[in-house]
Image (cartoon, rainbow, N blue to C red):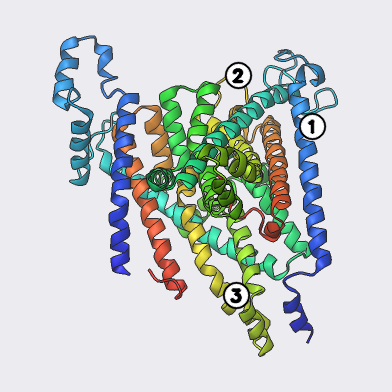
Amino acid sequence: MFAYAFRRLIYSLPVLVIGSFLLFWSVRTAFDPLAKLRQIRDPEVIIRETQRLGLDQGILVQYWRWLSGFVTGDWGVSSRTSGSVKPMIQSALTVTLELLVWGLLFAFIVAVVLGVWSAVRQYSFSDYALTGISYLGLALPAFWFGLILIQFLAVWPQQLFGWDEPLFFFVGLTSAGEEPTFIDTARHMVLPVLTLTVGLVATWSRFTRASMLDALSSDYVRTARAKGVPRRRVVVSHALRNSWGPLVTVVSIDAALLVGGLLVTEQVFSIPGMGRLFLDSLLAGDAFVLLPWMLITGIAVIVLNLVADIAYGLLDPRVRL
Amino acid sequence: MAEVTAVAKLPSNGRSKFLQRFIRHRLALLGGLTLLFLFIACFGAPIFAPFPKNQQDLLLGPVPPSFEHLLGTDDLGRDYLTEILYAGQVSLLLALSVALVSTAIGVLVGVLAGYKGGWVDNLFMRITDLFLVVPAIALLALALQGLGRSPFSIVLVLSLIGWTYIARVVRGQVLSLREREFIEAARVIGANDRQIIWKHVLPNLGGVIAVNVALAVASAIIIESTLSFLGFGVQPPQTSWGNMLSQASGLIGTSKVYLLYFPGLFILIAVLAVNFVGDGLRDALDPRSGSGSMQGRKRK
């Protein structure tokens, strides 16, 4: 298995290198690192800076210098905040990971429960109702859903009952100037997590339902029932046990989608995570933040895919890695 | 005993299967009609809209929905229903062009990769790998920041990033088609590659392509609105459902919050309708996929 993981990582290296080069190239052509200096109208400065930063050299040389800097931990200085890039990304990543972990956990559990529920009750009213709801979940723009949640779960009840503060907060992940308590964090977390996961819950629960239906109609489930295993146990430890593998794969395929969801969610709820960092840097043309950002999310997605494949192997002994 | 029959029944009996298919196809019909209605309403806006485009009534200002203004008016006193109908022209046209262009690219690449195999196929698979790694929204935003935000560049960028999904599907289909007897027979009687692709492969892809166009329209509408919200969509003064929605996003908690509901509802209805049509097409194409519809569908 370790050999497999190692081989996979080696294979994905070229993808990363080529991808990051294309990225570097496009960012270099789209954004001028000296844009601020051009306002000075002193040709001397421009020429000096061009030479100092090596901008007159070939794109490959520039890329190589940036990449070796990245690998050795020198990520450069943000042109937007003039701060060092590395701590910026680190702090954004910590915030985002918190949101991501809760989101994934929530989406996965809810999707599995709903999927199993409607598979076991196929063609019942609740099955149709859940199908309808998941159609809605897929047809909503996530940011609109988030805004509607804020209006109906936070602002409107607050206005209605005249509370001092809303039941669920919708700015940031912690209250300013207070020690973060569990309750406080939870009240900040509810709405962003719902916004982040609405599409995922819809897709994943549909998928769980489909693979559960497959499993429930298979011969070994019928055998288990025939020899008298209780229905509940058949569902959980025979049918569901066999649906884990495909489910984990779908979750990993949606990893990149999740990052896209972060962009929207963090923008709606003003959460200072990776999504916000990306948008702010993009609007300011801050190439030194964009490049490591892209590379890190790329690596994260690749690692997630790998973890999912390994998990598939562990969950389904028939699969040899 | 009762429980045993319950499990044995799970593969479903004939009547409920029929019922389910009937309902789904009625949904597809409903979706199609809704879509037709939306198209007529939006593109016939000069005739159907209750007020002329951009007619301001500054003295009136923003009023909530009433009989005179069904969806209320915005800050400048413009009738919101009229604005939404005109914005729908941009949203629908944009989504439709993205769907057509990305499907065209995807089919072209998918057929080539699946039919030719070898290095073409390899190269293609690596490119789609690349697209799977980078979050699409981030890439889109990056490209639009570089290219500007005209509707043309939005269509271009969305299509250039959206083709990979259909290309994968088409490639898979072509791989299995290639081995079928009728293709072999065509080759035996001396048809060349071009004839085989145009006469035998492409007609068999019709269903897949139709389904994909529908799904691509749905995701393009959502992505356009999301990009608008993030600041990379259609720019004012041109309006789309997406940027109407994003302009209204600051109105939460105010008395004008109704402006936030309606563009979103239009997006929701349009996307639902397109999805119903897509699912109906898929079911008509492959009745076996009945129970598991909507799986394998991905939003970008």
What percent of the width, then of the height, locates residue B270? 70, 37
Q: CA distance from mark 2 to mark 1?
A: 23 Å
Image quadrant in which the N terminus of chain A is located: bottom left
Q: Is residue B171 left or right of residue B278?
A: left
Visible residue check, residue A138: yes
Write down the chain letter for disc 2. B
Mark sitting earlier along the chain (2/1): 1
In the rendered view, would you say A289 is above or below B69?
A: below
Element at label 2: loop
* Residue under numbered circle 1: B37
Same chain under badges 2 and 1? The reply is: yes
Q: Which mark is residue A239?
A: 3
Identify the amino acid type marked 2.
Answer: Gln
Write down the chain letter for disc 1. B
In the rendered view, would you say B128 is above or below B47?
A: below
What percent of the width, then of the height, locates residue B274? 69, 40
